[in-house]
Amino acid sequence: MEADLLILRDEILAHRGCGFEPCETAARMVPGEGNPAAPLMFVGEAPGATEDSLGRPFVGRAGRLLDELIGEAGLVREDVWITNVVKARPPKNRDPKAPEVAHCMPWLERELAIIRPRLVVPLGRHALKHFAPEAKIGEVHGRVLEAGGRRLFPLYHPAAAMYNQTLKATLFEDARALGARLLDPEFVE
């Protein structure tokens, strides 16, 4: 398992010259990181400026808030896997285009196949769209959702709470619900 993740990590880090703008313009590719046996996989949309600079997912301001949310769920960052749908920062932090997402999806699918998390936590509407295209984050956040043969527990993106303070309380409430879900005997199976 760990060897497969190292191979995938090295492949992502070495990736260049594909013609897709984020892969060509980003300072570096950003593979996922965390516990290879993680029961939870947090999936964001794409790296931001700090992530692009450091080559690690969720290490900027939104990442610090994600760390707090993980703590609110009763875990630490080292307990989970953190990744993004797109592995390179789109120019000017724009939304990734559909072909760019499709280009990166095989890497995410390999992460999911290797780690086999019991719950996938899509962060925000963009990440949710890749797992449950018809779901609306405002309707499904903070609860378990079955989609595409996976169990999801969608949360608002931490960055959304930085721009909309009213979402911060909701995010923390949802993180506590996630922690309660982790204690549910059905989840432990």
Image: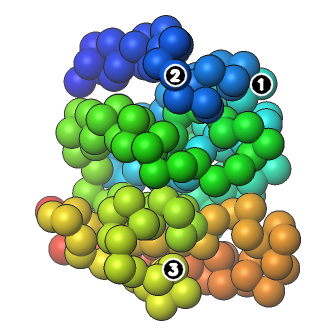
Secondary-structure class at tag 2: loop
Mark 3 is on which residue type?
Ile
Mark 2 is on which residue type?
Gly
Is residue 74 visible in the rendered structure shown here? no
CA gap, disc 2 and disc 1: 21 Å
Labelled disc at residue 137: 3
Is residue 148 visible in the rendered structure shown here? yes
**Quarter of the view holding residue 156:** bottom right
Q: Which residue is mark 1?
A: 53
Q: Quadrant of the C terminus?
A: bottom left
Q: Please tell me how many numbered marks the rendered image carries.
A: 3
Q: Which residue is mark 2?
A: 19
> As drawn, which residue projects farthest toward the bottom?
139
Q: Residue at x 26, y 19 (%)?
A: 4
Foreground: 21 or 129?
A: 21
Of the numbered discs 1 and 3, the one sitting upstream in the chain is: 1
Q: Position of residue 66 (x, y in %)?
A: 66, 56
Mark 1 is on which residue type?
Ser
Of the numbered discs 3 and 2, the one sitting upstream in the chain is: 2
Q: Quadrant of the N terminus?
A: top left
Q: Is residue 176 above or below residue 61?
A: below
Q: Is residue 11 left or right of residue 45?
A: left
Q: Label 1 neighbourhood size at 10 Å, few (<14), some (14-19), many (20+)?
A: some
Secondary-structure class at tag 3: helix
CA gap, disc 3 and disc 2: 32 Å
Of the numbered discs 2 and 1, the one sitting upstream in the chain is: 2
Q: Residue at x 48, y 59 (%)?
A: 127
Q: Position of residue 81 (x, y in %)?
A: 45, 42
